[in-house]
Amino acid sequence: MRHANVTTMMNVYTKALTPAKREAQSRVVDVLLDRSRVAANHAAGGTA
């Protein structure tokens, strides 16, 4: 499918429609951005 505006495409195809999909998407982003290490450091009293 082609859209005239990239924003339209992103709004249509990047939404996580259910809580389970939203959680799965968040986990993928966390892995890609290595957020688990940051969160663990923060929970242990670190600053970053």
Image: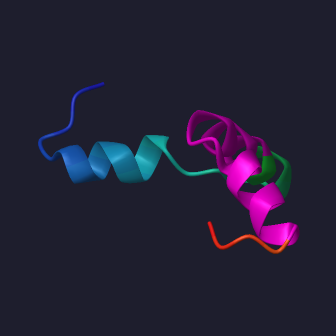
Q: Is residue 19 above or below residue 4?
A: below
Residue 28 location in percent, x, y? 68, 36
Residue 42 in the magenta stretch? The answer is yes
Q: What secondary structure characterizes most of the magenta part?
A: helix
Q: Is residue 46 above or below residue 2?
A: below
Residue 30 in the magenta stretch? The answer is yes
Q: Quadrant of residue 39?
A: bottom right
Q: Nearer the viewer, residue 44 or 9?
A: 44
Quadrant (top left/top right/bottom left/bottom right) for the N terminus: top left
Q: Nearer the viewer, residue 31 or 22?
A: 31
- On screen, residue 45 versus residue 15, left or right, reads right
Q: Residue at x 86, y 69 (%)?
A: 43
Quadrant (top left/top right/bottom left/bottom right) for the C terminus: bottom right
Q: Residue at x 82, y 75 (%)?
A: 45
Residue 37 location in percent, x, y? 73, 48
Residue 46 location in percent, x, y? 74, 70
Q: Nearer the viewer, residue 17 or 36?
A: 36
- On screen, residue 2 versus residue 46, left or right, reads left
Q: Residue at x 76, y 69 (%)?
A: 42
Quick one: which residue is furthest to the left in this view?
4
Magenta stretch: give its range. Answer: 24-44
Q: Residue at x 12, y 41 (%)?
A: 4
Residue 9 location in percent, x, y? 31, 42
What colouring style does the render use? rainbow
Q: Is residue 31 above or below residue 44?
A: above
